[in-house]
Image (cartoon, grey):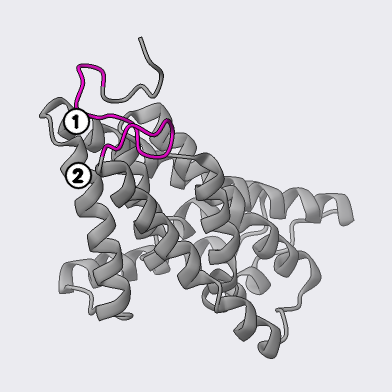
Amino acid sequence: MELSLALALGLLGSLHCAAMCGPLQLALPLPPGGPGRLVTGRLIYQLGRVATYCVLGLVAGLVGKSLILAGLQRWLSITLGGVILLGFFLSKKAALATPVVSVVNRLKAAMAWQLRHRSLRSLALLGALNGLLPCGLVYVAFAGAVAAGTPPAAILFMGAFGLGTTPTLLAISLSGRILPLSLRLKLRSAIPVGVCLLAGMLILRGMSLGIPYVSPDLSGANPVCCHAP
């Protein structure tokens, strides 16, 4: 799966992140020191968040590799694309199961504890914990990472997605301001385009049309490779 697509999904999705995680960015503790220390702390926070996405990418890659070895790569890609579309159009908000709510509450408690500290270590942990919070866009990116088929490719996919979300969140945490509501509403209308594009690419990939990098032939002995032997 193209890393540019993951990056674009992150860039578009960052407008959603601005609304959901903006207050957290503004509440981040200020590490002792001058402006350089402030910038360093905010960067470390973002790196912690992206690192968590990369770990999720590793999990996605292992799942995807197992399904590919079972000969299910084509159907995996088509199914993931269909699930993304159905989930997007049928239910914008899904209720969380009780065990999930319990885990989320524990994550929030751990984050609240770290917010009381001003060290760079606390900022890194806050970022890492933030990456574990339930988020629809992260689920979409995770599906794309599973379809990537190998752990390295899935890690890169999730890393690119995380980097795409970074500029907006970093700007909020440094400036102390969130984008104006009117602009945010206009830009957020582009998010469905990114989600549907990813779903369409997954379905197209699963159709195995023999188009390099877009819809490679997945019926051969080496389904992951896009190049002719």
Q: Amino acid at mark 2?
A: Leu
Marks 2/1: CA distance?
Answer: 8 Å
Relative to 167, residue 57 above or below: above
Q: Earlier in the sequence, mark 2 or mark 1?
A: 1
> Relative to 114, does residue 1 appear above or below in the rendering?
above
Quadrant assignment, res 160: top right
Quick one: which residue is furthest to the right in this view?
34
Coordinates of residue 72 in the picture (x, y in percent): 14, 36
Disc number for residue 68: 1
User: Does residue 215 show up magenta in the picture?
Assistant: yes
Residue at the image point whose x is 79% and y is 56% from the top: 38
Residue drawn at x 38%, y 50% as measured from the top left: 201
SS label for mark 1: helix
Q: Quadrant of the N terminus?
A: top left
Report the residue at 23% width, 79% height from top.
95
Label 2: which residue? 76
Along the line of sight, the residue nearer the viewer: 37 or 84: 84
- Magenta segment range? 208-222
Give residue 229's position: percent from left, percent from top: 35, 9
* Visible residue check, residue 110: no
Amino acid carrying mark 1 in the image: Ile
- Name the secondary structure under disc 2: helix
- Dot 2: few (<14), some (14–19), or many (≥20) neighbours within 10 Å? many
Which residue is outermost to the top? 229
The answer to whether residue 173 shows anywhere in this view is: yes
Q: Residue furthest left?
A: 70
On screen, residue 209 versus residue 133, left or right, reads left
Q: x and y percent of residue 161 in the render?
A: 52, 50
Figure label count: 2
